[in-house]
Amino acid sequence: MRTLARLVARSAPVLVLATALVCPACGPRATVTPVPAARTPTAVADVHSYARPDEVRVQHMDLALHVVFATHTIAGEIVLDLERRDRDAPLVLDTRELTIAAVEVAGTNSDWQRVEHRLGAADPTLGAPLEIPLRPDTTRVRVRYETAHDASGLQWLAPEQTGDGAEPFLYSQSQAIHARSWLPCQDSPGIRTTYDARVTVDRPLRALMAAELVSDGADGQRFRMTQPIPAYLVALAVGRVEFAAIGPRTGVWAEPSMLASAKSEFADMENMLSAIEKLYGPYRWGRYDVLVLPPAFPFGGMENPKLTFATPTIIAGDRSLVSLVAHELAHSWSGNLVTNATWESLWLNEGFTVYIERRILEVLYGRERADMEAVLGRQDLDEALAELAPEDTRLRLQLAGRDPDDALSDVAYEKGALLLRALEDAYGREAFDPFVISWFDRHAFGSVTTEQFEAFAKAELFDRHPVLPGRTPVDLRTWLDRPGIPSDAPRAHAAAFDRVDATVADFVAGRTKPEALPTAKWTTHEWLHFLRKLPRDLPAPQLEALDRSFALTKSENQEILAQWLEVCVLRGYGDADARLETFLRTIGRRKFLLPLYRALLAVGRTADAKRIYAVARPGYHPITQTSLDDMLGVG
C-alpha cells in the first residue's frame, strides 16, 4: 500500500465479476491457478489479534455476503474450516462492532448444532474477541452476523461522491486490522487462509472481489481464492464500473467516464509485469488488474491480490505517476506472496516493495527516473523523521497497546528500501538479486518476521558472499533497531534536480522571470522538486507571477496541485484558497489531506481548517477521519 510517499446502467441486472474476466462482453472466464504447496505455519505472537492460532487455526473461509446499500450494512454468513492443535481450546476470532446472530459447529460427519458463544469486552483499537466453544469432533464453525453501518473497513459513498455521480459505491479497506469490522476472522497477517465467497447485492450494480470468478447464477456470484492470504487482503467493491483489457494478463476497471483515460495511463502494466518477472521470478496470481476507485479512497493504492485498488489522483495524462502501479504490482511478491507476520515488521512488506518499484522504473524508464523517485522519497523520509518520535523511526517497531495504523509512515517504506539498497551496494546486484529471489521462493505464501530476515541474510548473503572491494559491511542491527538513518546510508542523486536547483536560485534572486523558466520539458518530479525547494519567505508577488505563468492553481495533476496548495498556505498566497477548499472537499487521499490541514494549523488558520473539515469529513474514509479528528482536536 502506498500511503505517505508524499459501472453498468441502472436498468442492468446485478452482476458480480472478478479479475479473472478477460472480456466482460464475452462472458466470464475463470482462470485456473494451481493451489500452492502447503506451508507449515509458524505461530507468531501478534499483539493486534485475539486469535490463538497455535491452538486453533482457520484454514479456509466460505463467505456468503449480501450487500445492502439502503442500510449501509453487509449481512454475512461465514463457514470456517479448522485445524485443531489443542483439542480442548476454543476458537477465538477477531471482531469489531459486528452483530453476531448465531454460531453453529459441525464435525466432518455431523450436522450443524448451535452453541453459545461469548463476545468479550471491546477494546477501542482491537475490537472484541469472539470465543466459540468446540466439541471434540468439530471441524467447522458457522457464524451469522451483520456489520455496523459505519464499519471501519468499509466506505459507503453516495452517488455525488463518485466520479460519475450516477450510483452509490462501496469498497473495503482492510489493512491493517479492519477486516474484522466486516468479517469475523483471525485478523493477523501471520495467519493465511484460502476462501470461497458468494455475493449478492440489493441494487443493479457490479461487484468485484480480489479473487477468481467461479460462477454467476441466480443465487449470486461465486468467487474463489486458492492461494492462502491473510485477512487484510480479502477485498470487495461494488459500484458502476466497466472493464478494459490492457494485456493478456492485465486490465483496468473504472467508472465509465474515467475508463479511457485509465486505460491510457496504465498502458505499461503488462510491460511492468514482464519486467518484474525477469528480475524476481514468475507472477503467481493469474491475472493482475487495477480498479480505479472514486476520489474518496484514502490511499494511493491497496495491493489486494489480483486486483489493486487505486486512487484516481494518479491519472495525470502523461504516465508520470504510474510508479504507484509499479509499487502495488511489486506487492505481488513482497507483501502478498511473502507477508510480514505482524505489523511490527511492516518494513518487510513496504521496504522491499519500494526497492522493487524503483528497479522496475529503472528497467522501463531509465536510471534517472528511478533516481528522481528515490530523491523525492528521501525528502519525504527526512520530513517524516523530523515529525516522528525516535522510537517510531526504527524498522523493528514495538506497537503493543497502539493502533497498527501508526506503523504506516515513510519509515517502513523509504528507510526499508534504503536498507535493501545498502545491501545491494555492499554486495553487488550479482549477489543481491539471487538473494532476493531466494527470499521470495523459500517463503512463498508464508508470513515472516524481521528475525527470520536477519537469519536468512546471514546464511544466504553475509556468509556466502564477500563485500565488494571498497565497500563496507551493513550492520543490520543498526538499521533495524536504532532511530533515524545510519550515517553511511546510500543517498540517490538526480542530475535533473541539480538543474532544477539552479532554476530555483535564479527565480528566487529575480534573475529569471517565471515566463522564462526552462520548464518546457519538466516532468512531474521536477515540478515537485522545484516547489519543495521554494524558500518559506518567498514573497506573495512571486507566487502570483508563478501562478500567472503556469496556472498552477488550476493544475489537473493532483500531485503538483497538492504540493502547490501547501506552498500557498504556508506562504500566505490567498488566491489559491478557493481551489484549496474544493480540493479538500473532493479528494480523500491522506497523502494530500494531512499535510494541507497541518499547513493550515501551522500558519494559525485553525478556524478555516475546522470549518472546511466539518463539511468535508463525511466524505472521508474512517481511517482518515480518525487521523484528522486527532490533528484538529474534534470528535
Image: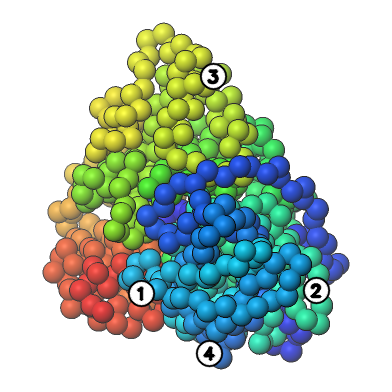
Verify CB contact (< 8 Å) between mark 2 and mark 4.
no
Question: Where is residue 135 shown, x and y percent of the image?
Answer: 60, 68
Q: Earlier in the sequence, mark 1 or mark 2?
A: 1
Question: Where is residue 528 shown, x and y percent of the image?
Answer: 37, 49
Q: Write the residue at 63% across / 72% down.
A: 105
- Identify the amino acid type marked 4: Thr
Q: Distance between the residues labelled 4 and 1?
A: 26 Å
Q: Write the residue at 31% across / 67% down.
A: 627
Question: Where is residue 170 shown, x and y percent of the image?
Answer: 56, 76
Report the residue marked by disc 4: 71
Verify CB contact (< 8 Å) between mark 4 and mark 1.
no
Q: Which of marks 3 and 1 is in front?
A: 1
Q: Distance between the residues labelled 3 and 4?
A: 56 Å
- Identify the amino acid type marked 2: Asp
Q: How far apart are marks 3 and 2 (CA)?
A: 48 Å
Q: In this view, does 444 lie above or below 422?
A: below
Give the secondary structure at mark 2. strand
Report the residue marked by disc 2: 216
- Identify the amino acid type marked 3: Ala
> Is 344 or 322 nearer to us in this picture?
344
Report the quarter where the C terminus lies.
bottom left
Q: Is residue 379 above or below residue 161?
A: above
Residue 121 visible, this orientation: yes
Report the residue marked by disc 1: 121
Q: Which of marks 4 and 1 is in front?
A: 1
The colour scheme used to paint the residues is rainbow
Give the secondary structure at mark 3. helix
Verify CB contact (< 8 Å) between mark 3 and mark 4.
no
Q: How crowded is mark 1: few (under 14 residues within 10 Å), some or many (20 or more)?
A: few
Report the residue marked by disc 3: 431
